[in-house]
Every structure is written in C-alpha cells, then in structure tokens.
Image: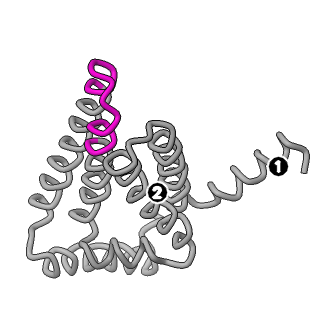
Amino acid sequence: MIWLTNTNIDKIRYFLIQKKYYGKVSGLSWSTRLKGFGICLLLAVVLGLIAVIIYFVSGDISGFAVLYSFAVILGIGSTMFLMGPLNQLKKMFDPSRLIATIIFLICLILTLVSAIVIKSSGLVLLFIILQLIALVWYTISYIPFARDAIKKCCRSVINI
C-alpha cells in the first residue's frame, strides 16, 4: 500500500482530530450534526417549494419572497451543523468569499424590504436573481479552480 505513507497517515489523523474537535466545540456528536443538517436542508427545500406554489397559485409576491428568503437562510444554516457556527462564519467572511457574502446578505435584506415594505414584484425578482448569483458564486468558491474556469469561460464567450 504505497498511499499509506507517514504523510498520508498524518493527514488522516488530522482530519479525524478536526472532526472530533468540531464535535466538542458544537457540543453535538457527528451523527447528531448530520441529522441537524438533513432536517434543516429538508425544511429549506420544503419552504422553497411552498414559496413557489404560493406564488403560482395566488400570485402573492410578498409571501413568496419571505418564504424563499427563510428557505435560503435555513439552507445556509444547515451547513453550520456540519462545520460549526463560528467556523461557518469565518469561512463566509474569508477574503475570497467576502464580496459574495456581503452582496448575498444585502440582497436578502433588500428582497424582504421590497416585498414587505415597497411591495414591488420587479424589485423582488431583481434581488432574488442577484441573491442567487451571489450564492452560486459563494458556493463555487469551495470548488478548486471553479471560479477561474467560469471567468475564463465567460471571457471566451464575450471575447474579452
């Protein structure tokens, strides 16, 4: 077994220690955190589907925006079970993700304001689209070289 070198064993040991460390920090076992993740993610999906159904059945943009926003918050909250709240916040506000996080949070707030206070469906749609773009950009930051590949693809499409 060539791959079982001292370096690889140290990496595996480090990973296992990290997993135990996060379990102690959050006070939850790994299986409990997985269950919390699954439940939050399931609730996020259900709320998102209910939001879409409410919009298409009644045309209620305010109800859609509120439920959709809570679904997105629950979706992000679900990952806090996996890595712990403080670690999640540190990663969200890491310099490589800072702009996407700020744009996402601002658009989330503006989505709710435009739906509840202003009651403008055009603004709600705009902020939800911007929110989604920021969330996708944030998410792909976890995939090595994904942002660079997307930038290169976009540049080739628009010939910059």
In the picture shown, does residue 66 fall above or below 147?
above
Dot 1: element: helix
Q: Name the residue under label 2.
A: 107
Q: Which residue sits at x=13%, y=80%?
A: 24
Dot 2: element: helix
Residue 20 falls in image quadrant? bottom left
Left or right: 32, with 64 as reference point: left
Amino acid type for the residue under numbered disc 1: Arg
State the image coordinates of residue 65 (x, y, percent, origin top left): 33, 42
- Bounds of the magenta segment: 53-67
Q: Which residue sits at x=83%, y=40%?
A: 157
Question: Which quarter of the rendered picture does the N terminus lie within?
Answer: bottom left
Front residue of this view, candidates 55 and 153:
55
Front residue of this view, candidates 88 and 59:
59
State the image coordinates of residue 4 (x, y, percent, origin top left): 42, 69
Query: Which numbered disc covers residue 37?
Result: none
Q: Which residue sits at x=33%, y=71%?
A: 88
| Total numbered circles | 2
Residue closest to the far front: 118
